[in-house]
Amino acid sequence: MPPGTMPGQMPERQPIPGVKNLIAVASGKGGVGKTTVAVNMALALGKLGYTVGLLDADVYGPNVPIMLGSTSEPMATPQQRIMPVDAQGVRMISMGLLNPGDKPVIWRGPMLHSVITQFLRSVDWGELDYLVIDLPPGTGDVQLTLIQTVAVTGAVVVTTPSTVALADVRKAIEMFRQVNVEVLGVVENMSTFHCPHCGKAVDIFGHGEGAKTAAEYGVPVLGEVEIDPRIRLGGDTGKPVAAQGESAPAAQSLYRVTKAVVARLAELAGTSGGPTVQID
């Protein structure tokens, strides 16, 4: 909790200057593809004509630089502002750029609060239509620092159809609701696998359970992302599928999710704003 804040009191949350929309991408547990969704969403927004930033707030597992194929070191201005690096057209900052290699980050809560606050307030993001924040899994210190420090426009919750993942999704949705952050919707990742030989759909982790959980909490389903080796390979090689454009077969579901997020934000704002996006 920020200094000077009384227990049970929510501090005033200020917007980031120049940032029109701040989207938190969260998950109740690890291993559901949250970072994959966040990275591809940021790239898809850029391809759709928006100006986009990507903040890797997963301090313990900062994988965004790997997925974007970036090893550039952020520079500082004479005014002690941090300049984000340009990674495939997205302005990006990550602890992975400041602490490269395999050395682990071993920090307690106050140190996490400090670095996340710096990423939010000391980075010169410039004018952005969207700032996508890849949160660590769970409902811990980083999440609380974010939602107590800045005005989050909305949160996207990523899950797989498995029962274990969905149990933690409920906790994530409840966390955002308790702090008055709008849940834009749920993304069911690893939803279905289409056999490349017979074309048959195989529900490896189940299917449709994310929609049931979303309906239970009265939040929209933003889309389903299939299990596709090309999505995994794109992240592993620093060439995410969304960078190939909307027509790339493995990227189409991710673009549908991105457009659904844009539509939800426009609905909440009561205006479309920005470049026109056609919802499929």
Image (cartoon, rainbow, N blue to C red):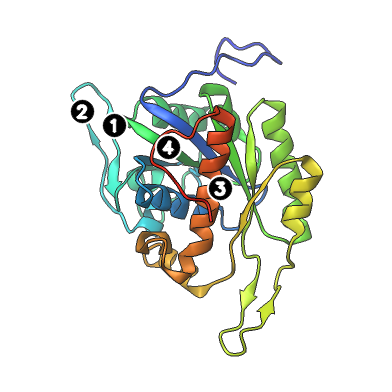
Under mark 1, the amino acid is: Ile
- Crowding at mark 1 (Cα within 10 Å: few <14, some 14-19, many 20+): some
Is residue 279 among the parts visible in the rendering?
yes
- Crowding at mark 4 (Cα within 10 Å: few <14, some 14-19, many 20+): many
Q: Tell me what residue is drawn at x 73 percent, y 65 percent.
A: 207
> Which callout, 3 or 4, points to the residue nearer the camera?
3
Q: Which residue is mark 1?
A: 82
Q: Which residue is mark 4?
A: 130
Of callouts 1 and 4, the N-terminal one: 1
Of callouts 3 and 2, the N-terminal one: 2
Of callouts 2 and 4, the N-terminal one: 2
Question: How far apart, in angstroms, are the residues tagged by discs 1 and 2?
Answer: 6 Å
Q: Which residue is mark 2?
A: 77
Under mark 4, the amino acid is: Tyr
Q: Which residue is mark 3?
A: 260
Residue toward you, 26 or 270: 270
Disc 3 is placed on an element classified as helix
